[in-house]
Amino acid sequence: MTVLIVDLIGAAVIALIVWYFWLSKTQGIVAAATSAGIQEIRVAVRGGYSPDTIQVAAGRPVRLVFNRQEADPCSERVVFDAFGVSAELPEGEDVPVEFTPAQPGEYEFACQMGMLRGRIVAT
């Protein structure tokens, strides 16, 4: 009986971890429009992207200003595969990344190793 209880608790913990890291989705932050009409938001890079979910309007230019606040080599570069854009992120410097999501949808961005992840939700 004890083995069964331990197995059930283990399975529940594994399910919780899977949900937390891969299945849960946050609402995200809405990018503010500048006077030039560019949707802009600052993204801190420290063990992940903060915010990691950003809402934008499709068809309008987006500027994400990344600031890497750690020395972890995984976070040295951010990659936006859907837009063919990537950028080096020197520690402590603001690095703007610009693109325009033409169609509504979800677009992922990640570090070059794919360990740190974020997403753009274009509506």
Image (tube, grey):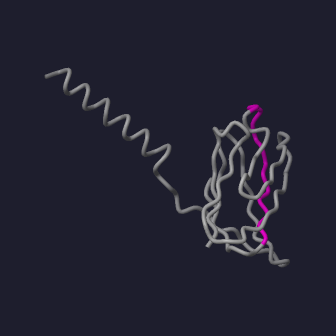
Seen at 79% across and 38% down, the residue is 76
Seen at 61% across and 58% down, the residue is 53
Seen at 79% across and 42% down, the residue is 77
Q: Vertical placement of 33 versus 90: above or below?
A: below
The N terminus lies in quadrant:
top left
Which of the 4 quarters of the picture holds residue 41?
bottom right
Image side of residue 73 versus residue 23, left or right: right
Image side of residue 72 versus residue 121, left or right: right
Image side of residue 99 versus residue 116, left or right: right
Taking depth in this image into account, of 74 and 91 the one nearest to the observer is 74
Q: Is residue 72 magenta?
A: yes
Residue stretch in magenta: 61-73
Residue 34: x percent and y percent? 80, 74
Which of the 4 quarters of the picture holds residue 36?
bottom right
Q: Is residue 62 magenta?
A: yes
Image side of residue 58 versus residue 95, left or right: left
Residue 118: x percent and y percent? 63, 51
Residue 49: x percent and y percent? 66, 48
Taking depth in this image into account, of 99 and 72 the one nearest to the observer is 99
Which of the 4 quarters of the picture holds residue 40?
bottom right
The C terminus lies in quadrant:
bottom right
Which residue reaches farthest left? 1
Residue 63: x percent and y percent? 79, 63
